[in-house]
Structures are given as structure tokens and as C-alpha cells.
Image (tube, grey):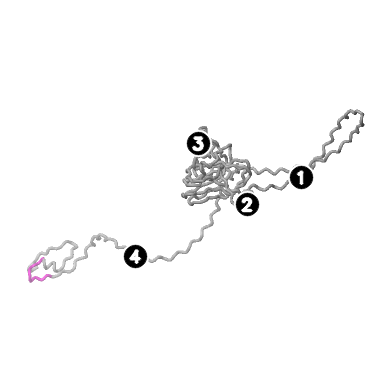
């Protein structure tokens, strides 16, 4: 080779070099640089690191609704439920009916035949008394007469003034029904004696709320068990004490004559009701052994509010002061 020479620094294999790079390495002016033919294709470079994933595209439109599936087969019939236990018969006997009216006495028997006449005495002649004749046979008993009509009802008598029906309400024995007001005690079942000289039927039981208090109360009647309340005869049901006035329940209860019953009261609020004054009540239950100034007016037992219990306590406490709750019953028309 002739002429001037130059040394070129070759780049590393795989690095692309341009003409400008060669001219920069050979600063001698006036020498022409001849671009050689392209070199052979280098080996493929190492794959670059994968770039971050692109953002999710928007959801496509909702496809059409599929056809409804075929209805499933009907399930088997379930087993029959267990039969419920039959309710028990009531063990409380019904009230005894009033005795029937006595029939009239039968007509008297026929009179027996008259005996034969004795001898007529002759004056001046003594006679011995003859033997007494035998008693004649008893006459045949007459037929029993027809039963008389039933007498007029005492109920009708006490609820009638001429042809006009009026109200007739009764409560425990008293000297003139001196009334006042007082609050009852919650959790206490009261009972007061009620006498029935004649057989009657009562169709209402009531008390009077004088100062309202939200709550409930019940009134009922107990049979006597030897000068104390015994078995429950009738529960008048629940009545509201949230308003003032008479609270009456409809009942239909026959009470035997010459009897002693007990009017009962139970409340779940200390409501103020119409009560009897101590001085106006007849103390038919007597006095305590102290013979003090507080006779016995009634009895009570501890009881949570609810339906009246079927049997009153066999050892109740005595009521010797207020409140003597005014529980009234109305005679049936």
C-alpha cells in the first residue's frame, strides 16, 4: 500500500459505526475516507426486558339472555306430621242447678163409711158400754195434683220497677256503700266476701278507675272453701286501666242461694280505683285475737299478674284496711 496510513479504532462487535464516527477518529484533513462494504449480519441481541402490561380494555356489551331451563321434577310428598296430644277434660265441675219446686200435696183420701149406730138407751135401764168397734180401713190415697207454675224470679223483682228495667249492681256487705278512692298494690290478688241470700245469675263484673294509669287489670269470682276463697268460678278477662271510668266485663254466671262467694281483683299497675271506706264495710270475717280497731275485711295472696289462678292460696293474709276494692256484679235481667 502506498500513501499515508491511519489507524482506526474498531468498536466492539455488534456496535453500529457511522461515517461521521470514522472521520472523527481521523482528524487528518485532505485524506478521503472510503466507506467499506457492509459487514456480515451480527448475531441476534439478547431479548429486552418485557415492558409493563397495558391497561384493561372496556367491558364488552352484555350477551343476550339465555333460554330458561326446564322446570325441575316435583319433589316427593313430605312425611305426615305427628298428631297433637288431645286436650285434657276439665276437672272443675259445673255449678249446681237450683232445686226444683215442690209439687202440691195430693187431695185427701176418701172418707170411710160411717159405723152402725149404737142402741138407743131406755130410760131407767142401766146399760154397760159396748166394746169399741174396729177402726175402719184407710181410704185410698188420692192422685198427686199437677205441679204449680214457677214462682216469680227474684232477679226480675230486683231489676224491675213496674215494667221498667233498671240497673242493679251489688258488692260485698256494707252499711250504706260509703265510697272513696285508693291505689291498689301490684302483685297482690285481692278477694272480698259476697253473700247470696237467693239464687241469682250475674251478667257483668266491674270496677271503676278514678285516676288512670297505663296497665291492665282483671276481676273474677271464686267459690268458698270454708270462709276463705277456694276454686276459681269465673275470670272476667283483661281490662284496660289507661282510661278512667267503669270497666265492665260480660259474664253469665249462676250463683246458688244461701251461699258465700269471693269477688277478686288483680292488676299489673298501682292504679287508683273506687274503694269502700273502712267505716262502711260489715266485718263478717270477724276480728283478730287482739280485738283491736281493725277488723278483717277480706283476704289477699301474692300473685304475678296474668290469668286468675285456678285455686286461691290455702293460707291467705287478712285485709284490715284500705284499699277495699269495690268489685261489683250486675244481676241478669
Between the C-alphas of marks 2 and 4, the distance is 97 Å
Between the C-alphas of marks 2 and 3, the distance is 40 Å
Q: Which residue is mark 2?
A: 161
Q: Which residues fall within the magenta stretch?
A: 25-33
First reached walking from the N terminus: tag 1 or tag 2: 1
First reached walking from the N terminus: tag 2 or tag 4: 4
Q: Secondary structure at mark 1?
A: loop
Can residue 251 be seen by looking at this rendering? Answer: no
Prevailing SS of the magenta stretch: loop
Between the C-alphas of marks 1 and 2, the distance is 34 Å
Q: Which residue is mark 1?
A: 145
First reached walking from the N terminus: tag 4 or tag 1: 4
Query: In this rendering, which labeled residue sits more in front, label 2 or label 4?
Result: 2
Q: Quadrant of residue 264?
A: top right
Query: In this rendering, which labeled residue sits more in front, label 3 or label 1?
Result: 3
Q: Are marks 1 and 2 in contact (CB under 8 Å)?
A: no
Q: Which residue is mark 3?
A: 293
Between the C-alphas of marks 4 and 3, the distance is 99 Å
Q: Residues within 10 Å of mark 4 (few under 14, many from 20)?
A: few
Q: Secondary structure at mark 3?
A: loop
The answer to whether residue 37 is left or right of residue 284 is: left
Number of numbered labels in the structure image: 4
Between the C-alphas of marks 4 and 1, the distance is 113 Å
Residue 17 position, x and y percent, is: 16, 66
Q: Is residue 47 magenta?
A: no
Can residue 45 be seen by looking at this rendering? Answer: yes
**Foreground residue among 245 and 240:** 245
Between the C-alphas of marks 3 and 1, the distance is 58 Å
Q: Secondary structure at mark 2?
A: strand
Residue 67 position, x and y percent, is: 47, 64
First reached walking from the N terminus: tag 4 or tag 3: 4
Q: Which residue is mark 4?
A: 58
Amino acid at each position: 500500500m502506498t500513501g499515508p496510513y491511519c489507524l482506526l479504532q474498531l468498536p466492539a462487535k455488534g456496535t453500529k459505526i457511522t461515517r461521521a464516527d470514522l472521520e472523527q477518529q481521523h482528524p487528518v484533513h485532505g485524506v478521503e475516507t472510503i466507506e467499506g462494504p457492509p459487514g456480515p449480519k451480527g448475531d441476534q441481541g439478547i431479548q429486552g426486558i418485557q415492558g409493563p402490561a397495558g391497561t384493561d380494555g372496556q367491558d364488552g356489551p352484555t350477551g343476550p339472555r339465555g333460554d330458561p331451563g326446564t322446570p325441575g321434577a316435583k319433589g316427593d310428598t313430605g312425611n305426615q306430621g305427628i298428631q297433637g296430644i288431645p286436650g285434657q277434660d276439665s276437672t272443675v265441675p259445673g255449678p249446681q242447678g237450683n232445686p226444683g219446686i215442690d209439687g202440691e200435696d195430693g187431695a185427701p183420701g176418701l172418707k170411710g163409711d160411717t159405723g152402725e149406730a149404737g142402741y138407743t138407751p131406755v130410760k131407767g135401764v142401766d146399760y154397760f158400754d159396748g166394746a169399741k168397734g174396729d177402726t175402719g180401713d184407710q181410704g185410698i190415697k188420692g192422685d198427686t195434683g199437677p205441679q204449680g207454675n214457677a214462682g216469680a224470679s227474684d232477679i226480675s223483682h230486683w231489676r224491675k220497677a213496674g215494667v221498667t228495667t233498671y240497673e242493679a249492681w251489688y258488692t260485698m256487705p256494707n252499711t250504706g256503700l260509703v265510697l272513696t278512692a285508693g291505689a291498689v298494690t301490684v302483685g297482690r290478688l285481692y278477694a272480698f266476701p259476697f253473700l247470696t241470700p237467693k239464687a241469682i245469675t250475674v251478667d257483668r263484673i266491674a270496677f271503676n278507675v278514678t285516676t288512670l294509669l297505663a296497665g291492665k287489670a282483671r276481676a273474677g269470682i271464686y267459690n268458698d272453701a270454708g270462709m276463705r276463697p277456694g276454686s276459681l268460678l269465673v275470670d272476667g278477662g283483661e281490662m284496660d286501666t289507661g282510661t278512667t271510668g267503669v270497666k265492665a266485663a260480660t259474664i253469665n254466671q249462676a250463683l246458688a242461694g244461701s251461699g258465700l262467694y269471693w269477688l277478686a281483683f288483680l292488676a299489673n299497675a298501682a292504679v287508683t280505683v273506687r274503694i269502700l271506706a273502712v267505716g262502711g264495710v260489715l266485718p263478717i270475717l270477724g276480728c283478730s285475737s287482739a280485738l283491736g280497731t281493725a277488723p278483717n275485711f277480706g283476704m289477699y295472696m301474692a300473685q304475678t299478674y296474668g290469668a286468675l289462678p285456678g285455686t286461691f292460696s290455702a293460707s291467705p293474709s287478712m285485709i284490715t284496711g284500705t284499699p277495699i276494692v269495690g268489685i261489683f256484679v250486675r244481676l241478669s235481667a
